[in-house]
Image: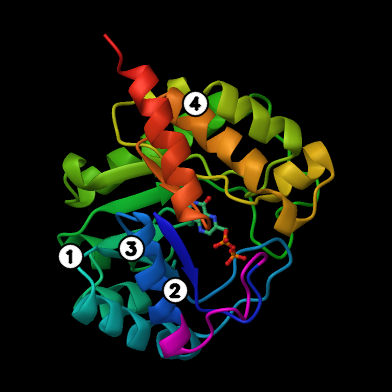
Amino acid sequence: MGVLNVTPDSFSDGGDFFSVSRATERAREMVVEGAAVIDVGGESTRPGAEAVSVQQELDRVIPVIECIHAELSVPVSIDTSKPDVMSAAVAAGAGMINDVNSLQTDGAVAVAVETSVPICLMHRQGRPRDMQKNPVYADVVKEVCKFLSQRSKECQRAGISNARILLDPGFGFGKTLDHNLLLLTHLDRLVALGYPVLVGLSRKSMIGAALDLAVDQRLHASLALATLAVWQGARLVRAHDVRATLEAIRMCDKVRTAE
Ligand code: HH2
């Protein structure tokens, strides 16, 4: 899953693709590099990020989704927590909803039920503004698995079929370095819930915290983390550096499935 942030302030590519033509060009590049899905986001969720209005988000993402959908054959995922953005994005051609708030915003479940697209439910503690200010868990792996299991059941009860649901532990979303490391080392427990697992580890601050590397120096560590996730059964990897990530995870998958 290639990351396409149509924002001025995303933590690693903010401002780089902040026009329809540059965003579409980047999507083309990522498809050539092997991306199976393009994840379009119009609001940064980095720690400290300010919220944007529905209209601002629509203005950023809808023209980009329309262009990618018209030109490229890969599905587009909409990275949003706003129900109005979800429905407009799906109407514009998006084939997946990626919600870092797990459809907990008022009206989000109802919108998701109306669409027939896959939905990624992600765990987070707190909001971008304050989520990294002392996150606390008694047992992070247990709590994240329990939350996602409950959310998936609630979504099913509301009418979203099992087959449409993906789960994501939400690396870096209200988690310390130790929480993130534990979630990755025990990712098999989330995989065991039986849903496809998506991970977003690319260039994340956990790498900065562990190895003291700036955002533009985190490629090799990102590949290591993606490999470890796929080794444990993750099915979709959200990444900025598509070609390198794909090579790493395809190789990993070959070893994993060797007979
Ligand atoms: N991480 C980010 C955004 N969306 N979605 C899922 N499912 N999982 C993630 O880990 C995830 C996500 C944050 O990364 P990025 O989009 O690169 O930055 P920003 O939020 O600053 O736009």
Q: Secondary structure at mark 4?
A: helix
Cα–Cα gap, marks 4 and 2: 30 Å
Image quadrant where one finds the C terminus:
top left
Residue 190 visible in image:
no
Residue drawn at x 52%, y 58% as measured from the top left: 240
User: Around disc 2, counting alpha carbons within 10 Å, would you say few (fewer than 14), some (14 to 19), or many (20 or more)?
Assistant: some
User: Would you name the residue on which mark 1 appears?
Assistant: 115
Cα–Cα gap, marks 4 and 1: 29 Å
User: Would you name the residue on which mark 2 appears?
Assistant: 26
Tell me which label, 4 or 1, sits earlier in the chain: 1
Give yes or no for residue 20 being in the magenta stretch.
yes
Q: Is residue 4 above or below residue 165?
A: below
Cα–Cα gap, marks 3 and 2: 9 Å
Q: Main secondary structure of the magenta part?
A: loop
User: Would you name the residue on which mark 3 appears?
Assistant: 31
The amino acid on which the numbered mark 3 sits, given as a three-letter code, is Val
Q: Which one is closest to the eye, mark 1 or mark 3?
A: 3
Residue drawn at x 64%, y 51% as measured from the top left: 203
Q: x%, y% of residue 210?
A: 79, 37
Q: Secondary structure at mark 3?
A: helix
Disc ID at residue 187: 4
Cα–Cα gap, marks 3 and 4: 28 Å
Residue at the limit of the structure toward the right, as seen here: 212
232 or 254: nearer the viewer: 254
Q: x%, y% of residue 38?
A: 36, 63
- The boundaries of the magenta stretch are 11-22
Q: Is residue 201 above or below residue 68?
A: above
Query: Residue 70's quadrant in the figure?
Result: bottom left
